[in-house]
Amino acid sequence: MPTEPETQPGSEVQPEPKESEELRRLRSELDEATDQALRSRADLENYRRRMQREMEDERRYANLRLIRDLLPVLDNIERAIEAAQKANESETLLKGFQMVAQQLQALLDQYHCKRIEALYQPFDPSIHDAIAQQPSAEYPPHTVIHVTRNGYWLHDRVVRPSQVVVAAQPLPGSAPGPAQGDGQETL
C-alpha cells in the first residue's frame, strides 16, 4: 500500500504550481476552441442563408434580359395599332396586331412582368423617365400627363422606366388649355 508522503510539522502539502498553470492554459485553449467552433458554425449558417437568397433572386430575375428584349417588339406593335386606328385602315391588320399584342402581354404577365401605371400619377424618378415638361393649369405640377413609352416591372424591380411628359407650373399670364401651341419643354 502506498504511503502518504511524510509532512514535516508546520509544512503543508501544496499542489505543484506547474499543474495548475497547465490546467488553466488547457481550459483557456478549450474555451477558445469551443468559441471558434461556434463562430465557424454561425458563419457557415449565414453563408448558406446568403447563398440561398442569392439563388432565389437569380431564379426570380432570370428572365429580365428576355423581357427587356421583348418590350421594343410590344412597343412597335402598339404603335402600329395606334396608327391603324387613326387612319381607319385595314380592319384585319388592326385585329391581327391587337391579337399579337394581347398574346405578348399575356406572355409578359405569365412571367410576372407588369406595366407601370404612370398616367396622371405623381412623377417618381425611380420609375419614370421625364423627357419633357408641359405647363398645365389642369394638372398639378409634377404629375404625369402623357406617357410616350410604357415602363414595366418584373416582380418588384423596374425593367424599364416609363418615358413621360410631366406637368409644370402654368406660364404667367397664359390662358389655360391646349390653344397655346405645343407648350412642351424638353428636359
Image: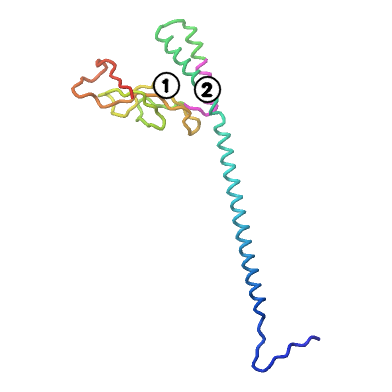
| Residue behind mark 2 | 69
Quadrant in the picture for the N terminus:
bottom right
Give whichever of 90, 75 is nearer the camera. 75
Q: Which residues are magenta?
A: 100-114
Query: In terms of image quadrants, where is residue 21?
Result: bottom right
Tell me the CA gap for discs 1 and 2: 15 Å
Q: For residue 55, which numbered disc appears in the image? A: none
Quadrant in the picture for the C terminus:
top left
Residue 16 position in % (x across, y down):
67, 80
Residue 109 position in % (x across, y down):
52, 26
Residue type for callout 2 = Asp
Residue type for callout 1 = Arg
Q: Main secondary structure of the magenta part?
A: helix
Q: Label 1: how many residues lie within 10 Å, few (<14), some (14-19) or many (20+)? A: some
Of the residues under marks 1 and 2, which one precedes in the sequence? 2
Query: In terms of image quadrants, where is residue 145?
Result: top left
Q: Label 2: how many residues lie within 10 Å, few (<14), some (14-19) or many (20+)? A: few
Q: Residue at x 54, y 23 (%)?
A: 107
| Residue behind mark 1 | 149
Query: In terms of image quadrants, where is residue 169?
Result: top left
Query: Mark 2 falls on what kind of element?
Result: helix
Question: Do the residues under discs 1 and 2 have CB atoms within 8 angstroms?
Answer: no
